[in-house]
Amino acid sequence: MRKYTLDKNDSREILGRTVYRIKRISDGLIGGWLQSEGNLSHTGNCFAYDDCVVMEDAFVTDHAEIRGNVLMKDFARIGGCARAEGEINICGNTVIRDKVQISGRGRIDRNVKIFGKAHITDKFYITDFAWIADYAMISGHSYIGGKSKIFGQAKVHESAITDSMVYGYSRVKNRIQCKRKVGKITILNVERENDERQTA
């Protein structure tokens, strides 16, 4: 059963692609913008609200919701009961699922995986092969990159992390961690601090 329609008379150009306003059939709600019906599943309760844009091969499925001005493109996926709201670009091969909550302003790209009940908010850039799971929380103005893994009930606030593992009940605040430069930020290593916290 079809859940929504594309209004071919209400279109706009985004990054060289034509996207169309959608309308939910059940209640007439005007939603966001899709390039095609291949961007939003007709099953489940998933929906693109407000001025969200889903284009190229990006896909919203299951009961996921995107709200505000979320832009999804490339091969990005959001599913399960995940929710993204705000000024957020989700692109590359990013996969977001389960009960993840993302809000604020930021970018998630490349091969990022976010699942479980992770919560990401405020201003952020998450990239490369970063992996965020369980009850992890990312807040403040934070950068997560490289092959970093943030999981358990770990919390990262106002920090830049690359190629590091933060887990358990670890708290990382106002830190620059790993051996790499991110913009003007030089990063040191988090794993030693993590070990100290675990044995303290």
Image: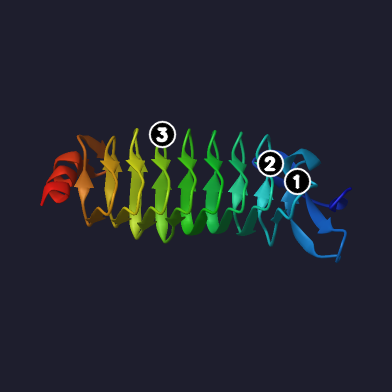
Mark 1 or mark 3: which is in front? 3
In the picture of the structure, the residue carrying the numbered disc 1 is: 19
Task: Answer whether labels 1 and 3 touch (C-beta < 8 Å).
Answer: no
Q: Count of labels shown? A: 3
Residue at position x 29%, y 49% in the image = 168
Mark 1 or mark 2: which is in front? 2
Mark 3 belongs to which amino acid?
Asp
Residue 55 circle label: 2
Residue 74 x %, y %: 61, 35
Task: Answer whether labels 1 and 2 touch (C-beta < 8 Å).
Answer: yes
Residue at position x 56%, y 56% in the image = 84
Residue at position x 46%, y 52% in the image = 106
Mark 1 burial class by Cα count in 10 Å: few <14, some 14-19, many 20+? many
Residue 67 x %, y %: 63, 60
Mark 2 belongs to which amino acid?
Met
Instruction: Measure the alpha-carbon separation of dots 1 and 2.
Output: 7 Å
Mark 1 belongs to which amino acid?
Val
Mark 2 burial class by Cα count in 10 Å: few <14, some 14-19, many 20+? many
Residue 128 circle label: 3
Which secondary structure, mark 3?
A: loop
Residue 150 x %, y %: 35, 45
Mark 3 or mark 2: which is in front? 3
Instruction: Measure the alpha-carbon separation of dots 3 and 2.
Output: 21 Å
- Tag 2 or tag 1, which sits nearer the N-term? 1
Mark 3 burial class by Cα count in 10 Å: few <14, some 14-19, many 20+? many
Which secondary structure, mark 2?
A: loop
In this picture, residue 57 sits left or right of residue 125: right
Q: Nearer the viewer, residue 27 or 36?
A: 27
Q: Nearer the viewer, residue 135 or 47?
A: 135
Instruction: Measure the alpha-carbon separation of dots 1 and 3.
Output: 28 Å
